[in-house]
Image (cartoon, rainbow, N blue to C red):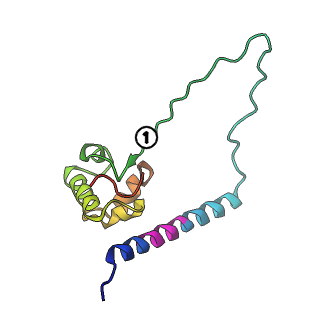
């Protein structure tokens, strides 16, 4: 009997990520219920009919690092990630075909919960597969 290990690994990781996300949503909702929601914006002043508003150009760039495409140099910009851990992340990514969720980075040797908590806000998953 041939066991599809890669499919099982990805399914397990997907379930892990879903459970982690549910925990985060639950904590957020619990916290939101305890306090009033902050005002995120105020009403803009009316624009004069004689002079239209100046166009606003907003460049949207994501300051986070994509674990599936980042170079070792980019990974080294993360707090607690040096050249050795960055190389381990790239090696893991190549071995497993990319990361499924950001929590999977804790599967890389040398990266535990402490390091993950320091970098979790600065990483994301672009698309599966990465650069093999």
Residue named by callout 1 = 63
Which residue appears at 69% of the width and 18% of the height?
53
Give the camera-side residue of 63 and 9.
9
Image quadrant where one finds the N terminus = bottom left
Image quadrant where one finds the C terminus = bottom left
Q: Position of residue 98 (x, y in %)?
A: 33, 59
Task: Classify residue 69 as left or right of residue 26.
Answer: left
SS label for mark 1: loop
Q: Position of residue 110 (x, y in %)?
A: 25, 63
Q: Residue furthest top?
A: 50
Q: Main secondary structure of the magenta part?
A: helix
- Give the extent of the magenta segment: 13-21
Q: Residue furthest front?
A: 1
Task: Classify residue 87 as left or right of residue 64.
Answer: left
Task: Classify residue 102 as left or right of residue 33.
Answer: left
Q: Say if the magenta span includes residue 30.
A: no
Which residue appears at 69% of the width and 37% of the height?
41
Task: Classify residue 28 as left or right of residue 124.
Answer: right
């Amino acid at each position: 009997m041939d066991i599809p290990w890669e499919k099982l690994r990805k399914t397990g990781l997907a379930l892990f990520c879903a459970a982690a996300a549910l925990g985060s949503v639950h904590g957020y909702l619990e916290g939101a219920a305890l306090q009033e929601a902050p005002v995120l914006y105020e009403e803009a002043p009316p624009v004069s009919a004689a002079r239209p508003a100046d166009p606003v150009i907003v460049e949207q760039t994501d300051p986070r690092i994509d674990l599936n495409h980042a170079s070792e140099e980019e990974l080294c910009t993360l707090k607690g990630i040096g050249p050795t851990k960055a190389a381990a992340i790239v090696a893991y990514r190549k071995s497993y075909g990319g990361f499924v969720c950001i929590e999977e980075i804790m599967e890389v040797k040398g990266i535990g919960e402490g390091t993950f908590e320091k970098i979790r806000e600065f990483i994301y998953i672009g698309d599966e597969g990465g650069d093999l």
